[in-house]
Image: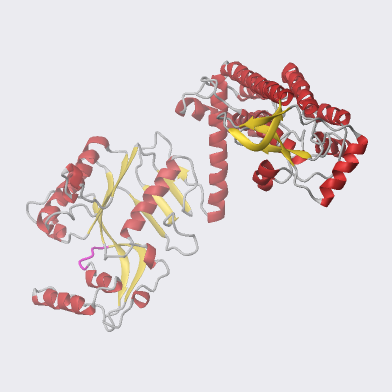
Amino acid sequence: RLLSARQANAHFFRDLAQLLGGTSAAMADEALRSLNERLLVVVADEAGAVAASPHQLAEAAAAAHETIRSLLELDAPPGQLGSPFELGDVESLPQQQQAGEAATAGATSSSSSSAAAADVAGYSASASASSSSSSSAATAAVAVGSPSSGSSGAWDAFYEANERGFRALRLRPERLASELAALEESRAALLEAAQLPSGWELVHAHRDNAIYLVKRRATRASAASDAASASDAPAASTSALLPATDRFGKRLEGRHVSARMSEARLRYLAACAGVEEAARREMQALCDTLSESLPLLAAAAHWALLYSTLSAHVGASLQKGWTLPRLREVEDGERALRVEGVWPYWLSADGAARNSFEWRGLWLLTAPNMAGKSSLMRGTLAAALLANAGLYAPVDDALVPRYDGYFLRTASYDVPSEGRSSFAQEMDDVAVLAAECGARSLVMLDELGRGTSAREGSALGVSLLAWLHERRMSAIFATHLHEMEALLSSPAAPSLPGLARKTMDVSVDDATGKVEFHFTLADGVCTDSLALHAARVAGVPDAIVSRAAALLAAGGAAPSPPAAASSPSSAASSPSAPEAA
């Protein structure tokens, strides 16, 4: 868009040149040819970019890189000045703009004019200039503002304010030859017009973008300097000085200019504007030239994004201990997902429990709170998704089918602004599942039906299991609705021969009530969600937990509540327990 709108700036072109240089080198590398060909297929398919061979893209990138180099000095550090004048300490510029810098050396007007010529010529100096020439340029810069008493800080600040913008672009000076020549001439004229009477000095007014003459405060050092300057050069007359005005035309007390200075300043500002306009024209012309190769530039940009992203992914994955899963062939009709040592992607390989299993068809997953059901489902889905994308995954090994969709349903919350309860959101998820998922989709349903009564939620859950089974879909249905088992065993229950019961391994000490989570998958059915243990670990007062245990016992269910001495740290002895919600 920036190229088409002719709005690209020097920073954009430098970044683009760096990208194009890297693209050209990588495309010309025969060792990367196979990888580049595959990446370019992805670029053409996913980004809609033009299909190109590595050789074509290498040539186009190299040509565009040279086009940018013909205008910009790419080897120079971006954003820096061309060092044609002394900047001094940038932090102290406001003070220099108000009072000027104390002069340290005097010079005649003829030497000042010579310094100005050397100063502007410094813009075209090559990056390989010798240190001695750099030292001479710096000396000339100090002498620039010293017709009789020296005010180099004022000149530095004035030049910086007006020239920083186009000098920071680092355009090649031969592309702006006539404009830079006009700038050099106007600078020399301004310096010649700024003859200082004895006892006066120059100050820079940043807001007014002007140079003014002010009477210097009398000191012994300044008196000696004025006497020395007067013996070397004739002093300028004060009769030609006029009261200075600010940018609003208001008279400035104690500040003066001459008619020659005002005219020369305007000429200098016009010359600066001319350089800026010429630089703008050159940049717009570069936009027009590169726009002709926009499809190939877009392909190069997308390739670079893919390459850098994949490089970062591989580096991070190897550091984390991830491996590259195997992907079943497209024509393979087997739908089983086999994983060895899968763990949650947000945990380190050393601190997480690993699971190995072969999954096909429907699983009904029941387990206590905090046992790791959700972590297993999220980790498995992430590994399958990464495998289908050809990326590394948190597994020791895996053989993954090709899926056409991934559906993970987790906790829902109400949306009062839309008049929707949390259960309405759950049903909306089911509607999306029914409309968009098929036999080749991977489906994870975590605690569906929690937003309504246990009886109705269980009925909906069994009905959904039957619907998934009829369509031969691969799904894991995790729930705490133990009433579903009773419905599945009732005479009216649908026949689900492909349904497998799974749980998460948990150990409970009957004597102490201590619970230990292993976070590993096992066959079986869980009938106790250990909700009272979860409540105690969360810090619920013991009086509330004990009363709940008594109510459960009175109602016919007699779970063994954890002992009052249990604490979150002792109850959850596994290092992964806090993360396995």
Location of residue 434 (image quadrant): top left
Q: Residue furthest front?
A: 239
* Left or right of 552 on screen, residue 36: right
- In percent of width and height, residue 528 lies at 21, 68
Image point (22%, 77%), residue name:
561
Location of residue 122 (image quadrant): top right
Please state, as top left, top right, bottom left or bottom right, where the C terminus lies in the image.
bottom left
Along the line of sight, the residue nearer the viewer: 447 or 209: 209
Q: Is residue 73 visible?
A: yes
The stretch in magenta equals 524-528
Give the dominant element type of the magenta stretch: helix, strand or loop.
Answer: loop
Coloration of the structure image: secondary structure
- In percent of width and height, residue 5 lies at 51, 20
Image point (31%, 78%), residue name:
514
Location of residue 207 (image quadrant): top right
Question: Where 64 falls versus 236 (above or below)?
Answer: above
Image point (48%, 40%), residue name:
390
* Left or right of 440 on screen, residue 106: right
Q: Is 190 included in the stretch rendered in magenta?
A: no
- In percent of width and height, residue 298 lies at 54, 25
Q: Is residue 39 visible?
A: no
Q: Residue furthest left?
A: 491
Along the line of sight, the residue nearer the viewer: 413 or 110: 110
Q: How many numbered circles does the render carry?
A: 0
Question: Where 333 falls versus 489 (above or below)?
Answer: above
* Left or right of 15 on screen, residue 551: left
* Left or right of 136 on screen, residue 98: left
Along the line of sight, the residue nearer the viewer: 358 or 188: 188
- In percent of width and height, residue 2 lies at 52, 24
